[in-house]
Image (cartoon, rainbow, N blue to C red):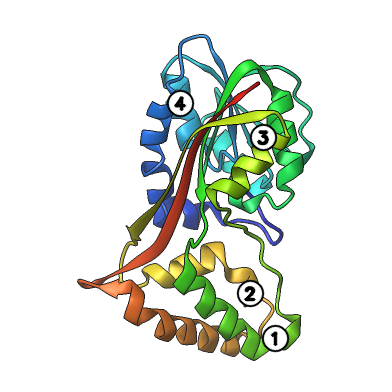
Amino acid sequence: MGKPGGWDPERYEAQHSFVWRLGEELIALLDPQPGERILDLGCGPGQLTQQIAERGANVVGLDASAEMIGQARQNYPKLKFVLRDAASMEFNSEFDGIFSNAALHWMLDRQAVAKGMARALRPAGRLVAELGGKGNIRHLEEAIEAVAGKYHGDTRPAKRTYYPSIAEYATTLEAAGLEMRFADLFDRPTPLDGEQGIENWVRQFKWYYFEALPVEHQREALEAVLEKVRPYLWRDGRWFADYRRLRLRAVKV
């Protein structure tokens, strides 16, 4: 994963551990075998990369964020991590499998990424991934866009994520030579930690909408977002993110 303006690995690890905890069952779908060569695409600080390695696979973690790669190398110095934009990676028939959790929706040049994944896989190699799917964070996104529009007007920052339907993503993969074998689009309301759960989420994942504002307007904008989403995302004494996930398995044909 990665985006202009940089990530905050400390905030990510301290407040958003659900990202890799919820990705653990995706590793079961990947089913890495001893001796296999696996690429963890959008590896972040490396927790799932390490879990794949513990299965006996030879794993390489790749991420476009220098901050995340730096943290991953610090966390797991025995593993290999590569700083690279997935759209420009140059692997050629090197991997038995590609794993990606909560990262592909940040990669806006999806055609280039799909071609890069297909090129990186050996024949019959597999892709196992989960990303934000169509309708992901609908309430959060609507609130953030509305509040950002108030401050920025038509010059508000462009979206840095996309959330495809099954059909959209299958079309992208198949054009690159990857055949979809399994896909599931499902709701997964995700509990966030503490009374500042949504605030921390916005600061980690969507702060680029507000970081250029004067400090006093940043707080004001954040409060406005919280007010808009509270009827939908605050329940039973805690915050939830309105996630919808697209989980898939594809093979190189």
Amino acid type shown at disc 3: Glu
Q: Which residue is mark 1?
A: 152
Residue 54 lies, in percent from the top left, at: 42, 20
Say which residue appears at 61% left-offset and 16% top-offset.
124
Which mark is on residue 30?
Answer: 4
- Check disc 2 and report its element: helix, strand or loop: helix
- Of labels 1 and 4, the one closer to you: 4
Find the distance from the CA under tag 2 to the CA under tag 3.
Answer: 33 Å
Q: Residues within 10 Å of mark 3 (few under 14, many from 20)?
A: some
Q: Name, please, the residue furthest toward the top.
A: 35
Q: Is residue 123 left or right of residue 112?
A: left
- Check disc 1 and report its element: helix, strand or loop: helix
Q: Which residue is mark 2?
A: 209
Find the distance from the CA under tag 3 to the CA under tag 4.
Answer: 19 Å
Find the distance from the CA under tag 4 to the CA under tag 2.
Answer: 35 Å
The quarter in which the C terminus is drawn is top right
Label tally: 4
Amino acid type shown at disc 1: His
Amino acid type shown at disc 4: Leu
- Check disc 4 and report its element: helix, strand or loop: helix
Say which residue appears at 47% left-offset and 28% top-offset.
50
Q: Name, please, the residue furthest toward the left.
A: 236
Find the distance from the CA under tag 1 to the CA under tag 3.
Answer: 38 Å
